[in-house]
Image: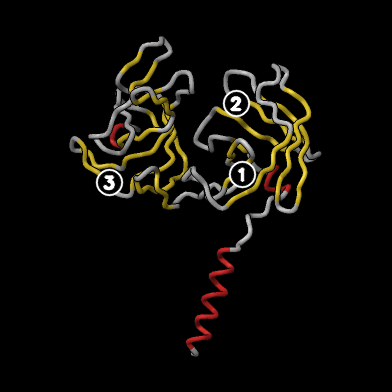
């Protein structure tokens, strides 16, 4: 094949990739998903909900009162949010107008796209299926079908899948901080390491999990509260 022709093909393909459009925002996509600022692994935070009559609400899921409501429209491939009504709690969180775009990238490794709005990022569509290879911080992992497990003893929960990683202190309902995750409590498992590891004679994967603790009864490394941690699979049922 002519070298000039090959160069032309490469140029056309390269230009097509660089000018690839944003994913299409459709009514069906908006209605079919819960759009949250913290993704599927969290149980609290801001949530956008869209209705068929082209109205929307944004509210805080969890303890507290924050948000507003309004109408939305489409302008080419942009989503326009027009705030019309404050939350019953007052003006906190009210935004008069926002422009949103669906983009083919995500700061959350469990999604391949995100909704970027003036003043915030939301996750809803684009949740990666089980079996997808992802990187959580700098750790290679694979998404699994979500399931719950029970801590069979007081266990260490960690910032990374390693015995040398920082472990988390957990605050109990009594306000006491303890250096472990309590026996008998549930964890939701969402991803695992690629390889098993042997710890104290048991071979298992490390799992990326969400404890059954919310933003007010949580665990922390130093002063950074989190609801997403790593646990060794040999410690749960």
Question: Pointer 1 and pointer 3: residues touching (CB < 8 Å)?
Answer: no
Which structural element holds mark 3?
loop
Specify which label sits upstream in the sequence, 2 or 1.
2
Q: Quadrant of residue 184?
A: top left
Q: Earlier in the sequence, mark 2 or mark 3?
A: 2
Question: In this figure, which residue is indicated by the disc labeled 1?
Answer: 115
Residue 155, image quadrant? top left
Tags 2 and 1 touching, CB below 8 Å: no
* Relative depth, front residue between 94 and 181: 94
Q: Nearer the viewer, mark 2 or mark 3?
A: 2
Reading the image, the residue beneath label 3 is 196
Q: Are marks 2 and 3 in contact (CB under 8 Å)?
A: no
Residue positioned most to the left: 201
**Residue 138: mark in rendering:** none
**Residue 161 pos. (x, y %):** 30, 39
Direction from residue 84 to residue 125 in the image, left or right? left
Nearer to the camera, 190 or 112: 112
Residue found 33% across the figure and 29% down from its top: 157
Across and down, in percent, residue 59 comes to 65, 27
**Does residue 183 show up?**
no
Write the residue at 51% across / 76% down: 10
Q: State the CA–CA distance, disc 2 to disc 3.
A: 36 Å
> Rounded to the nearest whole Å, what is the CA distance between mark 1 and mark 3?
35 Å
Q: Residues within 10 Å of mark 1 (few under 14, many from 20)?
A: many
Residue drawn 50% across the image and 80% down it: 7
Res 176 quadrant in image: top left
Relative placement, left or right, of 149 versus 152 is right
Circle 2 is placed at which residue position? Answer: 61
Residue 42: tell me if it is visible: yes
Q: Position of residue 65 (x, y in %)?
A: 64, 19
């Amino acid at each position: 094949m002519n070298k000039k022709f090959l160069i032309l093909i490469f140029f056309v393909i390269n230009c097509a990739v660089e000018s690839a459009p944003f994913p299409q925002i459709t009514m069906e996509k908006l209605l079919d998903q819960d759009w949250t600022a913290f993704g599927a692994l969290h149980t609290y935070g801001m949530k956008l909900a869209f209705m068929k009559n082209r109205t929307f609400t944004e509210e805080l899921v969890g303890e507290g009162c924050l948000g507003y409501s309004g109408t939305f429209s489409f302008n080419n491939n942009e989503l326009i949010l027009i705030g019309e009504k404050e939350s019953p709690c007052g003006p906190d969180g009210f935004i008069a107008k926002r422009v949103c775009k669906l983009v083919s990238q995500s700061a959350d490794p469990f999604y391949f796209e995100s909704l970027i709005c003036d003043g915030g990022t939301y996750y809803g569509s684009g949740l990666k299926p089980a079996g997808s290879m992802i990187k959580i911080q700098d750790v290679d992992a694979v998404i699994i079908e979500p399931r719950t497990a029970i801590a069979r003893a007081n266990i260490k929960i960690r910032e990374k899948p390693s015995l040398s990683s920082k472990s988390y202190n957990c605050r109990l309902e009594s306000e006491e901080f303890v250096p472990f995750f309590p026996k008998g409590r549930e964890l939701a498992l969402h991803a695992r390491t690629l390889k098993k590891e042997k710890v104290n004679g048991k071979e298992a994967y490390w799992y990326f999990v969400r404890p059954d603790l919310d933003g007010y009864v949580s665990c922390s490394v130093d002063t950074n509260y989190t609801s997403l941690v790593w646990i060794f699979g040999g410690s749960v049922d």
